[in-house]
Amino acid sequence: MIWTRIRNLYLDYKYRKDKIQYARFLGVKVGERCKIHNNPRDCFGSEPWLVTIGNHVLIATGVRFITHDGGTFLFIDEYPKTNVLGPINVGNNVYIGVDVKIMPNTMIGDNVIIAAGAIVTKDLESGWVYGGIPAKKIKTVEEYKEKALLNSVETNGMSMGEKRNHLKKIRPDWFA
């Protein structure tokens, strides 16, 4: 009992200190320059070793990698050892938005943006923005980039107060 509490305290400390390191500890294969804004214990489910993440991937809050099909619960009395599992592979240079769900046996290509709330049920081709339930192509990443640059403001790296003051100067209508 005491060793379980000590282990859990250690894992909680490790999670707070370095989420990438903790994900790797769980068995997730994680590339370089990645960010996870989620608790890896919640994010990677019951088979984290079936998840592979490429380089330069950002995983937003609330994302879930689901590597199994829980529907087999319906036949557990007849087939008590049955389980349906599948890997999830994420390419390089990928943004996975808030509350995205990624189902088993899916591959996400390179240079992909997945919009908040999407559910990924099949492979996603490289170079596209996807959204919806199930996730569908919305536009190319290049089309998104053009529009994003037209609407962008240079606030990255600012504190919350600095950002607010800067936005008040350039967009006072947002504060009316």
Image (cartoon, grey):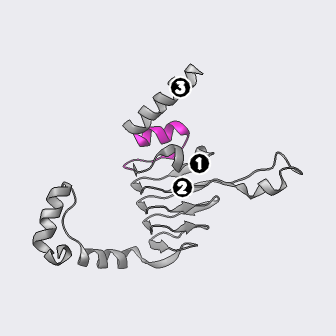
Determine the residue positioned at 62% across, 45% down. 46
- The residue indicated by pointer 2 is 64
Q: Which of marks 3 and 2 is nearer the N terminus?
A: 3
Left-right relation of 165 to 15: left
Residue numbers of the magenta segment: 18-34
Q: Residue 116 appears at what percent x and percent y? A: 45, 67
Q: What element carries label 1?
A: loop
Residues marked 1 and 2 touching at CB (< 8 Å): yes
Q: Which amino acid does label 2 sit on?
A: Arg
Residue 24 or residue 73, whichever sits in front: 73
Q: What element carries label 3?
A: helix
- The residue indicated by pointer 3 is 5
- The residue indicated by pointer 1 is 45
Q: Which amino acid does label 3 sit on?
A: Arg
Q: Residue 47 appears at what percent x and percent y? A: 63, 45
Q: What residue type is labelled 1?
A: Gly
Badge nearest the viewer, 3 or 2: 3
Q: Earlier in the sequence, mark 3 or mark 1?
A: 3
Determine the residue positioned at 17% across, 78% down. 173
Q: What element carries label 2?
A: strand
Q: Which of marks 1 and 2 is nearer the N terminus?
A: 1
